[in-house]
């Protein structure tokens, strides 16, 4: 378990889930996920969010040990998604006098998820700038709508300078997973929060005025050192700037011929000095990682087979998902394959053209069944053009 120490008064009470396999019904998490929850011990006691139903018993046990006979006064609901808010009912059952702190949208969603008969008498509704006084600790509420639900809010504890950041700055993987933060934080960000870059930029502006010593997200490790590094990553990601130099080749191949052309293109790009070339077979590689890499690199080549006079479905799925996630600011190449009536290029161009600030590089290369000398020459021209600044 990575270090979950925050302070003498702020304690971690979350849990790791190593057996979930698939997160939110779609994201492969080979190293699981953590559900983070915290307790602030003061004259008044605040529980910072609950956790997923899968770890209820462990979470309740952690709370009991931490409280050591005391009773909590508040549960702060930063985010109503069930992996964080499922156990609101469990808390009420165990601690009947507990108050629920949220904003106006929080309580709309609570009424949709739960049937709490005395909700009006136990709710404390807060808005931007409100402060909850716990004694020595004071929580400032910062509304963070659409990161990535409309009710999301952050809390800044002024005494110990801790930012409780909801899903922001989170990552896939349990707390005892030994891996760099970047990769799984990036995959998490672009797949879950990526659509809402404008909103992330707004909350970063709010956070820039705070003296932050610790960031406590709802997934992933507690961040205590080099916070500028993590904040800078979020600035890059949320402004849709290229993060890494290189070319990402996303290849949708039915029988392997398009993939063979992709391997040849990768070789060409490397020989022409591309600092890094990443080639993926989109139908066989992790979809969420394909999304991550498509955002990471500023230069992307989409290669796909034609299918039913249309586009190979895995490529259509990828492009449609990228469009839905506000994909933008890229230099893009297109390669199609088709035996008798190539249609993939037209379909890809149609979807990509609807995205913001995308430069489509000529030529759009057509392969007839397998790469030949003529189409190989066209690939070489495309490689030259995609690498031009």
Image: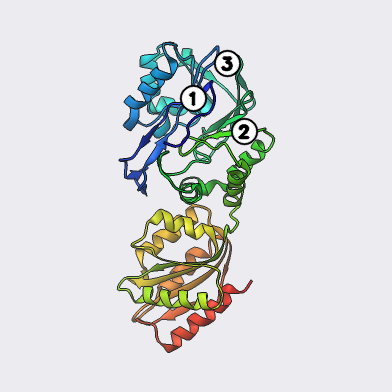
Q: Gap in Å between the C-alphas at discs 2 and 3?
A: 19 Å
User: Which callout, 3 or 1, points to the residue nearer the camera?
Assistant: 1
**Secondary structure under the numbered disc 3 in the rendered image:** loop
Q: Which residue is mark 3?
A: 134
Which quadrant would residue 64 be assigned to in this image?
Answer: top left
Residue at x 63%, y 33% (from the top left corner): 212
Instruction: Give the number of the disc on residue 227.
Output: none
Find the distance from the CA under tag 3 to the CA under tag 1: 15 Å
Rendered-image quadrant of the N terminus:
top left
The numbered dot on residue 11 is 1
| Res. 142 visible in picture | yes
**Circle 2 crowding by C-alpha within 10 Å: few under 14, some 14–19, many from 20:** some
The part of the image, by quadrant, that contains residue 172 is top left
Residue at the spot 58% in from the left edge and 33% down from the top edge:
214
Nearest the viewer among 210 and 350 is: 210
Distance between mark 2 and mark 1 Cα atoms:
15 Å
Residue 140, horizontal then vertical, whole percent: 62, 25
Residue at screen point 44% across, 55% down = 321
The reply to whether residue 363 is visible in this rendering is: no
Q: Secondary structure at mark 2?
A: loop
Q: Position of residue 142 (x, y in %)?
A: 60, 30
Q: How many marks?
A: 3
Residue at the farthest bottom position: 373
Which mark sits nearer the N-terminus, 2 or 1?
1
Residue linked to disc 2: 213
Q: Decide: is 103 above or below 280.
A: above
**Marks 2 and 1 in Cβ contact (< 8 Å):** no
The image position of residue 22, as x and y in percent, is: 33, 45
Q: Is residue 351 left or right of residue 253?
A: right
Dot 3 or dot 1, earlier in sequence: 1
Frontmost of labels 2 and 3 is 2
Callout 3: 10 Å neighbours few (<14), some, many (20+)?
some
């Amino acid at each position: 378990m990575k270090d979950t120490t925050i302070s003498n008064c702020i304690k971690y009470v979350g849990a790791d889930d190593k057996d979930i396999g698939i997160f939110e019904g779609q994201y492969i998490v080979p190293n699981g996920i953590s559900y983070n929850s915290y307790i602030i011990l003061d004259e008044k006691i605040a529980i910072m969010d609950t956790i997923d139903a899968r770890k209820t018993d462990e979470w309740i046990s952690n709370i009991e040990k931490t409280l050591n006979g005391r009773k909590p006064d508040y549960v702060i609901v930063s985010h109503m998604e069930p992996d964080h808010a499922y156990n609101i009912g469990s808390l009420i059952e165990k601690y009947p006098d507990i108050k629920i702190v949220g904003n106006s949208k929080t309580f709309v969603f609570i009424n949709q998820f739960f049937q709490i008969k005395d909700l009006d008498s136990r709710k404390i509704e807060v808005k931007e700038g409100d402060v909850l006084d716990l004694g020595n600790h004071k929580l400032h509420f910062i509304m963070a709508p659409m990161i990535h639900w409309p009710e999301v809010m952050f809390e800044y504890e002024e005494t110990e300078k801790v930012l409780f950041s909801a899903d922001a700055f989170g990552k896939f993987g349990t707390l005892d997973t030994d891996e760099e933060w970047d990769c799984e934080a990036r995959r998490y960000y672009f797949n879950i929060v990526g659509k809402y870059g404008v909103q992330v930029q707004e909350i970063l502006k709010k956070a820039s005025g705070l003296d932050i010593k610790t960031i406590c997200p709802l997934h992933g490790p507690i961040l205590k050192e080099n916070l500028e590094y993590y904040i800078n990553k979020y600035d890059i990601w949320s402004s849709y700037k290229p993060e890494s130099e290189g070319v990402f080749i996303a290849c949708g191949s039915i029988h392997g011929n398009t993939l063979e052309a992709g391997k040849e293109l990768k070789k060409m790009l490397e020989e022409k000095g591309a600092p890094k070339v990443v080639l993926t077979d989109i139908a066989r590689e992790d979809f969420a990682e394909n999304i991550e890499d498509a955002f990471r690199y500023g230069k992307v080549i989409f290669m796909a087979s034609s299918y039913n006079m249309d586009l190979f479905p895995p490529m259509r799925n990828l492009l449609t998902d990228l469009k839905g996630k506000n994909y933008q600011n890229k230099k893009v190449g297109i390669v199609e394959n088709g035996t008798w009536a190539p249609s993939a290029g037209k379909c890809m161009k149609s979807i990509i053209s609807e995205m913001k600030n995308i430069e489509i590089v000529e030529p759009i290369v057509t392969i007839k069944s397998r790469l030949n000398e003529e189409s190989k020459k066209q690939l070489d021209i495309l490689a030259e053009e995609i690498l031009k600044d």
